[in-house]
Amino acid sequence: MPNDDAIIVGAGPNGLSAAIELTQAGLRVSVYEASDTVGGGARSAELTLPGYTHDLCSAVHPLAYASPFLRRLPLAQFGLEWINPDAALAHPFDADECVVLERSVSATSASLGVDRQAYSELFSSGLEHWSRLETAFLHPFHLLRRPASLARLSMDAFRTARGLVHRQFQGAKARALFLGLSAHSMLPLDRIPSAAFGLVLGLYGHAYGWPVPRGGAQKIADALAAYFRSLGGSIVTGRRVNSLIELPPARIVMCDVTPRQLLRIAGLRLPSGYRRSLERYRYGMGAFKVDWALSEPIPWRSRRCSEAITVHLGALPQEIEASERAAWAGGLCERPFVLLAQPSLFDRDRAPAGRHTAWAYCHVPHASEVDMLSRIENQVERFAPGFRDCILARSVKSPRDLERENPNLVGGDINGGVADWRQLLARPTWRLHRTPLKGLYLCSASTPPGGGVHGLCGYYAARAALHDLKK
């Protein structure tokens, strides 16, 4: 057998996307994956009881659904089917009220009272310029190159979420809805660019919805792997790469790993200055995750919560701010902000007939070992009395558990590293996907455009490698 032109270390969505892009360019490519299954952060398994499918990490996938790279691949031919409810997100409040982010901006803003017009203006303007905004947000340097052409929304992206909601909104409902969206940044909400995450996720909800793949996140990875194999690519699972010297010769080696793993496998081959830069790379707060097998749907006090694939639990703006600030600073909240997904309401393939699954996590300090189970379930019970009576089984994962299952989730950080402006633009260093070693590249979520199942980190890394081959 001839040597491969390229070897990919890691079969997450980014590694598989890089492999596909290189193969489409005519290169011979092999992928080595340490786990027995492909997928990385997009995997599914029976974590609780037989017949109940749970997502190991990511569960709701607006970025995958809308990814300009994944969109052009024939993944439907390889088993990927999307389910896209009309409501992307529900945010309940204690007084049996609930705000729902729907595809329609006007329908969403109708329940925001005094902020109805302000919300409509903010997101309608974004949708009007969405094609340029999407390009900018999916590659942050574009935002810096053309801020004037993106007008006010460019400036909003450079704000803190806290600053934006206090400037833009007067009432608690709109503020809480936007802060919940912004909390996906895993940053304190008084830090830049937390507002950008709120804008992007809100706009994705209005432009595309927040869909899930039928059968679980694993279907995304399986479709990518199947398509790659159809192009002639090779995937070797159960093969952990401990050092670059273990790999056969190849013109390109692309690593779907974070800086910590690259330091381990590349070792002293990396120049000392670059090693020091990788050693300074910052990982953020962790996630504490729970999966439930349920006897029935979650009994939400507000029926509107059952319309949405995702539910944010942390009613008031000050609750959400306090939760994220504490996790960042190494503390904990009795009422953490909880992000919950309930895919079996819309996907019957996730559980036996009449049964259901749910998935939730909260942010905690990096590598925290504190058990947050009761706090998370108290938050669900707060908005859905009787929830605990529905639980048949549960799977609980601390940040350390998440990292043991997937070494890229360092300390439970599901975003591949802190996503402040410094590490969003120079991620993991100013070299971005390239390294000082000829032919060695990074293609993980620790490179632009960062976390999320969109494949673009792999795509951009592959484009960089193909450009370098022409030199």
Image (tube, helix red, strand yellow):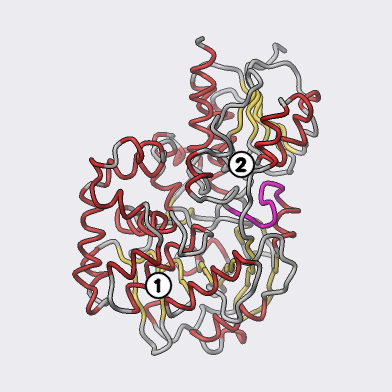
Lower sequence index among marks 1 and 2 = 2
Name the quarter where the N terminus is drawn: top right
Foreground residue among 219 and 421: 421
In the figure, is residue 24 to the left or right of 37? left
User: Which residue in the protein does label 2 denote?
Assistant: 12
Q: Amino acid at mark 2?
A: Gly
Q: Position of residue 13 (x, y in %)?
A: 56, 41
User: Which residue in the protein does label 1 denote?
Assistant: 90
Q: Residues within 10 Å of mark 2 (few under 14, many from 20)?
A: many
Q: Quadrant of residue 44?
A: bottom right
Query: Residue sitting at 67 percent across and 46 percent down?
Result: 408
Relative height, residue 53 to residue 267 (above, below): below
- Residue 250 inside the magenta-drawn segment: no
Query: Residue sitting at 49 percent across and 78 percent down?
Result: 319
The majority secondary structure of the magenta stretch comes to: loop
- Residue 413 inside the magenta-drawn segment: yes
Magenta stretch bounds: 406-414
Q: Quadrant of residue 194?
A: bottom left
Q: Position of residue 364 (x, y in %)?
A: 63, 67
Q: Position of residue 361 (x, y in %)?
A: 59, 67
